[in-house]
Amino acid sequence: MYGVFLNVSGVRCMIVGGGRVAERKASALLVSGANLTIISPVLSKSLEAWKAEGKFHHINRPYQRGDVASYSLVFAATDDLAVNTSVYEDCHARGIWVNVADQPDLCSFYVPATICRGDLTLAISTNGANPSLAKAIRLSLEEAFGEEFALFLTMMRQVRNEIKNKIADPDERTEFYRNLLQSDILKDLAHQDLSFAWQTFATKIKEWEAHERTACRNSSKPVGIDTDQLGLSTDPTHTQ
Ligand SMILES: C[C@@]1(CC(=O)O)C2=NC(=C\c3[nH]c(c(CCC(=O)O)c3CC(=O)O)Cc3[nH]c(c(CC(=O)O)c3CCC(=O)O)/C=C3\N/C(=C\2)[C@@H](CCC(=O)O)[C@]3(C)CC(=O)O)/[C@H]1CCC(=O)O
Ligand SMILES: NC(=O)c1ccc[n+]([C@@H]2O[C@H](COP(=O)([O-])OP(=O)(O)OC[C@H]3O[C@@H](n4cnc5c(N)ncnc54)[C@H](O)[C@@H]3O)[C@@H](O)[C@H]2O)c1
C-alpha cells in the first residue's frame, strides 16, 4: 500500500448508504471540506442532523447504476453486497477511486484510522488485515500526541521562512530542528504556555547564531551545530 494524504477540499465525493459506516466516512470527509453527496433511502440520526445543517447533498432513494458518473471519490457503504459491487463496477469502468466497505479486495484505497492535531495528521493502516488494531493503535497514540503538536506546528509555520533564510544549509536546519525538539518547547506548549515556548525558541535561535559566529571566526572548523560545544545533551530525555 502507498500512503497519501488527499486534498478533498471542494472535491465531489459520494457515499452510497447512510448507516454507521457511511456516517464515519462522512464525518472525516466533511471535516476535510469535501463537497459531499449521499445516496440512501435511510440516513442515521447524525447524518439526518448534518443534512438539516446543510452539510451535504442528499439523494433520497436507492442507488441507480451510473449514479457515480460525475464524482471523483466514491464510498460504497450499504449493507447490500450486490449494491456495493455495482458501485465498484461503475467506478472501475470510469476510473473513479472507490472504497467498498464490505470487500477489501475491491477497494482502490483504504481509509486509515487517523489522529489530527492541527497540521499534524497521523494515519494508521493494517492493509485491511485488522481495522480494530488500527483503531486500538489510534487510541493509544492519541494520549502521546496532544494539542501541543498543533501549537508547535502553528509556531513553526509562522517562522518557517525566517528559519529558512537564517539557516540556509538544509543539513544545519535539520540539526537546528532536532535540537529544538530536544528542548522544553513541547512541554511548554503542553502547559499552553506560548510565551515560554517562544522564549525557548528564541534561546535556540540565539544559540545557533552564537555558534555561527564562532564558526566564522574559526574557519578551520566545519560549519554546523556542535551540540557538545553548546552544552546540549543529545539525550532526548535531557531538558534545558
Ligand atoms: C480504520 C477505519 C477507518 C474508518 O472506517 O474510518 C476502518 N475501519 C474501522 C473500524 C472498524 N471496521 C470494522 C470494525 C469491527 C471489528 C472488525 O470486524 O474488525 C471496526 C472497529 C470498530 O468499529 O470498533 C469492520 C470492518 N472493516 C472492514 C471490513 C470488511 C472486511 O474486512 O471484510 C469489516 C468487517 C465488516 C463485517 O464483518 O461485517 C474494512 C475496512 N475497514 C477499514 C477502515 C479499511 C481497512 C483499514 C486498515 O488498513 O486497517 C477497510 C478495508 C475498508 C475501509 O473501510 O476503508 C475504522 C477505525 C476508525 C477509528 O476509530 O480510528
Ligand atoms: N469498512 C468498515 O469500516 C466497516 C465497518 C463495519 C461494517 N462494515 C460493513 O459495511 C456495510 C455497512 O455497514 P453499516 O453498519 O453502515 O450498515 P447499516 O445497516 O447501518 O447501514 C446500511 C445503509 O445502507 C443503505 N442502503 C441499503 N441499500 C441501499 C441502496 N440500494 N442504495 C443506497 N443505500 C442503501 C441503508 O438505507 C442504510 O442507510 C456492511 O456490509 C458491514 O458489513 C464495514
Image (spheres, rainbow, N blue to C red):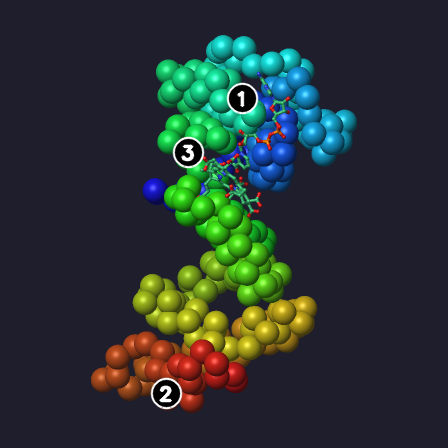
Q: Is mark 1 within 8 Å of ligand 2?
A: yes
Q: Quick one: SS at disc 1? A: loop
Which amino acid type is marked by label 1? Asp
Camera-side residue of 27 and 106: 106
Which amino acid type is marked by label 2? Asp
Tell me the residue that label 3 is attached to: 104
Label 2 crowd bin: few (<14), some (14–19), many (20+), radius 10 Å: few
In the image as oriented, which residue stretches furthest toward the left? 220
Q: Quick one: SS at disc 3? A: helix
Camera-side residue of 135 and 195: 135
Give residue 158's position: percent from left, percent from top. Answer: 55, 59
**Residue depicted at x 51% and y 25%:** 76
Which amino acid type is marked by label 3? Pro
Q: Quick one: SS at disc 2? A: loop
Give residue 195's position: percent from left, percent from top. Answer: 66, 72
Whether residue 15 is situated above or below residue 176 in the rendered picture:
above
Q: CA distance from mark 2 to mark 3?
A: 52 Å
Q: CA distance from mark 1 to mark 2?
A: 64 Å
